[in-house]
Image (cartoon, rainbow, N blue to C red):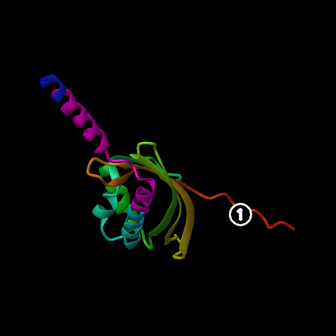
Amino acid sequence: MKSSRLLVSLAAFVIFCGCSTVRFDPAAERERLLRRDAEWAAAAAEGKDVSKIVSYWTDDAVVVPPGQPIVEGKAALRTFVDASLKMPGFSIRWKSEKPAFSPDGKMATLQGSNEMTMTGPDGKTISLKGRSVTVWRLEPDGQWRCAIDIWNDPPPATPAAK
């Protein structure tokens, strides 16, 4: 009798633990990740708080800007962001879409388009359009942070068909 009670208790414990596992909800995470990315984009567009902008990257983040050296880690990212924001006329805007998640829901990718503006050597505004891919990681504190951030130029426009 004692062993059957122990067995029933053990079975109930296993069932209870199995049922309490949090399941990955792709729809909810999609909205949460896109909202998080939009918050980051707004902070970057505002261009006032370097610490806030940098907080959206993981501590070990890797950023691959076009035509520039790779930037690795928070200290280097802080320097990169600070230097960018100090460029005359600098601003950046982006919009991300198409979230794709790993099966366990702990990693994700986003595709996006961006536009940077700055003042050129002749004093005129330069606008650079780009496209991006970011890799996001769900951190232990429950926040999505960007681990890999890469962007480049879009392909040249094709002439209209005649």
Residue under the point 37% across and 67% down: 39
Mark 1: which amino acid? Ala
In the displayed structure, would residue 128 be above or below residue 109? below
Where disc 1 sits, the SS reads loop
* Image-based side of 157 in relation to 11, left or right: right
Quadrant location, the C terminus:
bottom right
Q: Quadrant of residue 89?
A: bottom left
Q: In percent of the image, x 46 and y 44: which residue is there?
A: 102
Where residue 42 appears, as percent x and y from the top left, is 39, 70
Q: Looking at this view, is 47 or 98 the one in front?
A: 98
Q: Is residue 131 highlighted in magenta?
A: no
135 w.r.t. 116: above or below: above
Q: In this view of the protein, which residue sits in the foreground, 79 or 3?
A: 3
Label 1, on which residue? 157
Image coords of residue 114 (percent x, y): 52, 64
- The boundaries of the magenta stretch are 6-34
- Foreground residue among 88 and 58: 58
Q: Foreground: 47 or 101?
A: 101
- Identified at 54% across, 76% down, the residue is 124
**x, y percentage for residue 54?**
33, 58
Magenta span includes 7: yes
> In the image, what residue occupies the spot 55% across and 70% down?
127
